Every structure is written in structure tokens, then in C-alpha cells.
Image: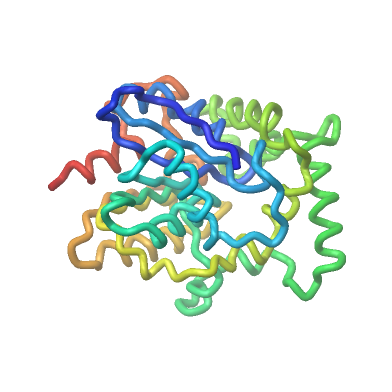
Amino acid sequence: MEYLVYGSKRPDAKVIVPMHGSSTTGGWQCQINGSLCTELNLKGIAPSVLCHGYSDLHIGRRIVDFPLDLEVILKAEGVEEFMVEGTSFGTAHAMAIAWHFPLDRCVALGLNVPYLPDSICKKFNLDSKADSLPRPDARSWYQAWNFLVADLMCVAPGISPPARFMRYLPEGKETMKARPWVFDTIDDDQKTRLVARGSQGQGWEQFSFDVTVLWGFDPRKIKTKNVAVWYAKDDSLVPPSHGEWLANHFTSRDGVRTNIRSENLGLGHFTYFPSLGPVYQATEETMPKALLDLHSQK
């Protein structure tokens, strides 16, 4: 598994682990958060999850096992205490990390446009991302379709990269006008890093029922005491009801400090990407700053 280190080099810097969304890599996190983390005295450690960037292809992996890989990275970097944040697909990995590590290690959890596993959706009657994915019993044509779509999305001349299609989402037009840098930086990451070792892993990751919605753990058992949940009411990619459920869950827990944001700005899934672009000031409310503020409240 590849990971990238960026931000502050001071010995007293706090550590944040950002988990990227689908169709991007840890390199994108460096691109958008590097200057901010330096200003906030944060050291960023950004893994690229399996099948993304230079991380190995691993057909059949489970999100519940991801923290075991992160343990190796944290040991290599000499890290004990850290904060974790996730965006979209990365929120599943961020919650797995918070579920796995004890309170004195994972001290804050940030969820940016999060979604929930199928088990929680079914229990609480929420729309599930599983409803848009082929079931595992369709395995033979399903895998072939995954790999074909991955090639078309990521490597086909004139079609790739996926960022081109994001502009045509319901919120894509408004995002292009308000924050054009969002698609430019995603496009750059997809062209230079995302499929550096081939596109086939992307087919499994983005369309796999097994990976995407069968996490292997219950997010209600997360014990982290500092939690930020930011969700967009006009999100077209993940149901806003998932963010609302998570916000209510963590807010109702005794002893948990929360930072909740729920907005409808016409930017949907991209609402909480910094408005000033990759180089911006620490005074702007961002997820790293929100987690740092929560953690500093003793």
C-alpha cells in the first residue's frame, strides 16, 4: 500500500489520516490539504486504498481489514495518536479505523458526505447504495462488466478520466461555476496516479457489493469522542439521510463532542470541498480545522 506524507514537519505536529473517495488517491489529499496542514501544524499521512494509485490490487478485500494495513503505516511513521477523516467512499474506511483503534490512539473522526453499510440501511429503513449494485449472485457477468466499465472510465482515449463525467452530475454545473478547481485537481490525480498500475481494481472497487456496502463491522460501536459529520441535503451521490442518521447517532451519545453541518448550497457532493481551492487560509472552516478544534476542547 502506498501512502504520502505532507504538511508540517515540526516535531510537535499532530497527525491526521485523510481517506480519499473513490476515483482518487492519497495524492489528491496532498494536493488539496498540503498548505492547510502546514499552516495548522498538522502532519498528513494519506494512504491510497487498495486498487487505487500504486497500492496493490486485492480482489475480495473487506473494509473491516483496512486498519490492519494502516497499523503498519503508523508504525513506520512512529505515530501513536492521530485523527482520521474520510470523504465519500473514504468515510467507510475512516469509520473502520475509528472502530478498530482504541480511544487513546484515534482521537477524532471526521465524516464528509458519508454513507452507511447495507446492514444499517436495512435496519433503519434508509435508502441503500446496495440497491444500485449488482448482487453477488450475479458474479460472472458482474465481474466482466466491472472490468469493461473500468477500462472505459479510466483508460479509454477520449472518454477518461471519470472527472469529466462528474461535471454532468446534478451538482456538477454549479460546482464548475463556484469551484472549478475541484474537477481540475481530481482530473489531474486520475490522469497521473489513479490507474498507474491498471484499471481493473477500479472496476472491483467502484461496483462491488462486497466491498462497498458489506463493511464487516457495526459503525454504532465506534467509541471516538470527537466527531464531525458534514452532509449535503442536495447530495446526488450518497443519500443525505445517511449523514443525518450519523449526525443524530453521535450527537445522542454521552460524552461525545460533535461538529455537525448540513447545508443545501447547490453543490451537493462537493459542498464541503474548500471554497478557496488547494491554497487557502486556515481561517476557512475545513474538516482538518474542525477536528483540530474538537480535539483541543479538553
Residue displayed at 34% across by 37% down: 15
Q: Nearer the viewer, residue 50 or 284?
A: 50
Q: Where is residue 257 in the image (x, y as percent from the top left)?
A: 21, 55
Q: Where is residue 95 in the image (x, y as percent from the top left)?
A: 43, 57
Quadrant of residue 139 within the rendered picture:
bottom right
Residue displayed at 54% across by 30% down: 182
When the figure is inspected, residue 115 is found, relative to residue 221, above or below; the finding is above
Q: Which of 48 and 102 is in front in this view?
A: 102
Quadrant of residue 14 within the rendered picture:
top left
Q: Which of 271 and 296 is in front in this view?
A: 296
Residue displayed at 39% across by 25% down: 7
Extreme bottom residue here?
123
Q: Is residue 139 visible?
A: yes
Q: Can residue 262 be seen in this view?
A: no
Q: Position of residue 261 (x, y in %)?
A: 33, 49
Instruction: Name the quarter where the N terminus is drawn.
Output: top right
When the figure is inspected, residue 284 is found, relative to residue 263, above or below; the finding is above
Residue displayed at 69% across by 53% down: 58
Extreme left residue here?
298
Quadrant of residue 284 within the rendered picture:
top left
